[in-house]
Image: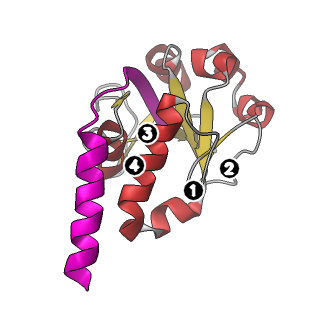
Amino acid sequence: EAAKVYEDVSARVKDVSGQGSVGKTVAFFYINEDGAAVTRREGDYFCQMIEAAGGTYVSFTEEGAADSSPTTVTVEMERFYEGVRDADVIIYNGTIDEGVSTLEALVEKNGLLADFRAVQNGDVWTCDANLYQQITSMADIIEELRAALTGSSEGGRFFWRLG
């Protein structure tokens, strides 16, 4: 039974990733209590899922980043602004803090976010703790990410657009 589930998930992931790039850059982050952006480390499994969905993950190297965990990189807001301001899509990681439910709430975390192309274009998404509790739903997550990146969905079980 486990092998059948694995084969199904594997085939669905292969199908989505085989559809190629959608030509959009994607940032995934949250704002910590110090006002810095916390992003996933390049090569992290979530970054790989964004890439499998057809996105190009906006990553930050260790150079100039604050001391970070094995899975995240903490970036001062000025540097984050430089790297993400022109990203096509941003996903606010609401799994760590209380999250956000509107674009206004996102911009309240830091006013610089109002200048971001994705915020101005309304291409801002969020998620909650369910994202990390569903490892057997990897194919569903990647499919939802692709739908978000292609504009064919307003949201689903794991991601939803901020309005």
Residue indicated by mark 2: 99
Res 146 label: 3
Query: Is residue 36 rendered to the left or right of residue 14?
Result: right
C-alpha span from label 1 to label 2: 7 Å
Magenta residues? 1-28
- Earlier in the chain: of badge 1 and badge 3, it is 1
Q: Is residue 38 visible?
A: no
Q: Quadrant of the N terminus?
A: bottom left
Graded by Cα atoms within 10 Å as few (under 14), some (14 to 19) or many (20 or more), the crowding at tag 3 reads many
| Residues at circles 3 and 2 in contact by the CB criterion of under 8 Å | no
Left or right of 126? Residue 22 is left
What is the CA distance from the residue labelled 4 to the residue labelled 2? 21 Å
> In what element is the residue under mark 2?
loop
User: What colour scheme was applied to this rendering of the protein?
Assistant: secondary structure
**Dot 3: what SS?**
helix
Q: Amino acid at mark 4?
A: Ile
Identify which amino acid the numbered label 3 is placed on.
Arg
> To which residue does mark 4 refer?
142
Of badges 3 and 2, nearer the viewer stands 3
| Other-residue count near label 2 (Cα within 10 Å), few / some / many at <14 / 14–19 / ≥20 | some
User: Which residue is denoted by mark 1 in the rendering?
Assistant: 95
Q: Please tell me which of labels 3 and 2 falls first in the chain.
A: 2
Quarter in which the C terminus is drawn: top right
Q: Separation of disc 1 and disc 3 at Cα?
A: 20 Å
